[in-house]
């Protein structure tokens, strides 16, 4: 199917969504995707995966307790040193 | 959005220096901000290396103490985040070694996670469907989807997990991720791709 098969598109899908493919290779992928619903859906899924990965990494409810523990330890070590 | 990682941009050296100056001056609010920015990610990376959340929390606390003790020695050879994660990863690896745990960040052999998805000519056997159920509203409305993503990341091998957190969540530059983990850029890209395939598969199972 226009140069690349679906397996080859999948192997390059991360590089495509990260903008890391050379121009001609990216063009080959886009030509394939223009006629392949499966690869279009797959690349869309990879974009959603990238966005959800980013969203899942935002903060943590445990941060405040951990911050208090670090500050307490620093205060204690400061006293010991003094 | 960073087109390469889909991440918020890493603070430039200018803002790094503002943070560094504030930390040297003992500014608690600046430290709290930096802590909230990186602590959860540090625990996630360290858990992958040490194999234990409890040990990872200890190592991360040690790393923060080291960061504050040595902040005056920070040089602009890396971003502040890159420097912090280098301290963390070195400490986590040392701790893993002490406990007899061998940690490799290699990409490993060929990925076969989608081997059954293609026919002999490399075309889909079962065409993937669009995830029409996943909308921004649904993601915001419930934590379930993000919990699935987090669980999938936590199940990754240490190298893939570290790359996913550092590059995919913290937005560190590719070169910095490679320097922190001691891997080359080709390996890093392979690991990022495999990590995304694994997380994608977890989301897909939820969608079906």
Image: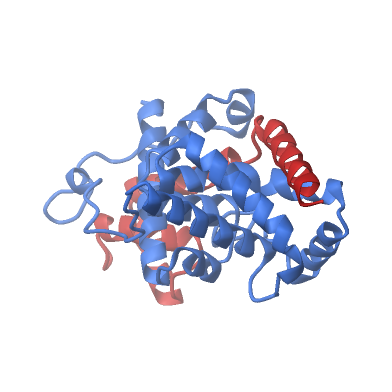
Chain colours: A red, B blue
Q: Quadrant of the C terminus of chain B?
A: top left
Q: Position of residue A36 (x, y in %)?
A: 33, 51
> For this view, does B125 lie left or right of residue B137?
left
Asked if residue B111 shows in the view, the reply is yes
The image position of residue A46, as x and y in percent, is 44, 48
* Residue occupying the point 51% across, 65% down: B180
Of residues B41 and A24, the one drawn nearer to the viewer in this rendering: B41
Q: What's the residue at 84%, 64% (across, down)?
A: B21
Q: Residue furthest left?
A: B120
Residue B143: x percent and y percent? 57, 26
Location of residue B32 with respect to B122 vertically, above or below = above
Quarter holding the N terminus of chain B? bottom right
Residue A40 visible in rendering: no
Looking at this view, is A31 or B8 the one in front? B8
Q: Residue at x 42, y 34 (%)?
A: B203
Is residue B35 positioned above or below B167 on the image? above
The mark total stands at 0
B81, B114: nearer the viewer = B81
Classify residue B186 by image quadrant: bottom left
């Amino acid at each position: 199917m226009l140069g690349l098969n679906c397996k080859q598109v999948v192997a390059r899908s991360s590089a495509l969504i990260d903008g890391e493919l050379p121009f001609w290779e990216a063009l080959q992928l886009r030509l394939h995707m223009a006629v392949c619903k499966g690869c279009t859906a797959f690349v869309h899924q990879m974009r959603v995966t990238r966005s959800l990965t980013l969203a899942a990494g935002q903060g943590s409810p445990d941060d405040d307790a951990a911050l208090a523990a670090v500050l307490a330890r620093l205060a204690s070590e400061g006293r010991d040193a003094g | 959005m960073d087109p390469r990682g889909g991440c918020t941009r890493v603070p430039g050296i200018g803002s790094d220096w503002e943070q560094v100056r504030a930390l040297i001056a003992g500014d608690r609010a600046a430290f709290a901000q930096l802590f909230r920015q990186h602590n959860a990610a540090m625990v996630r990376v360290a858990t992958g290396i040490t194999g234990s959340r409890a040990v990872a929390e200890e190592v991360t606390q040690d790393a923060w103490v080291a960061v504050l003790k040595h902040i005056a020695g920070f040089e602009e050879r890396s971003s502040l985040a890159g420097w912090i994660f280098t301290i963390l990863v070195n400490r986590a690896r040392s701790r893993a070694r002490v406990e007899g745990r061998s940690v490799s960040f290699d990409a490993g052999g060929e990925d076969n996670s989608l081997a059954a998805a293609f026919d002999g000519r490399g075309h889909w056997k079962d065409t993937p469907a669009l995830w029409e159920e996943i909308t921004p509203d649904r993601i915001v409305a419930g934590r379930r989807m993000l919990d699935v993503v987090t669980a999938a990341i936590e199940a990754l091998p240490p190298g893939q997990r570290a790359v996913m957190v550092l590059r995919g969540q913290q937005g560190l530059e590719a070169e910095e991720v490679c320097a922190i983990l001691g891997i080359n850029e080709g390996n890093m890209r392979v690991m990022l791709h495999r990590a995304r395939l694994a997380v994608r598969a977890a989301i897909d199972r939820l969608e079906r």
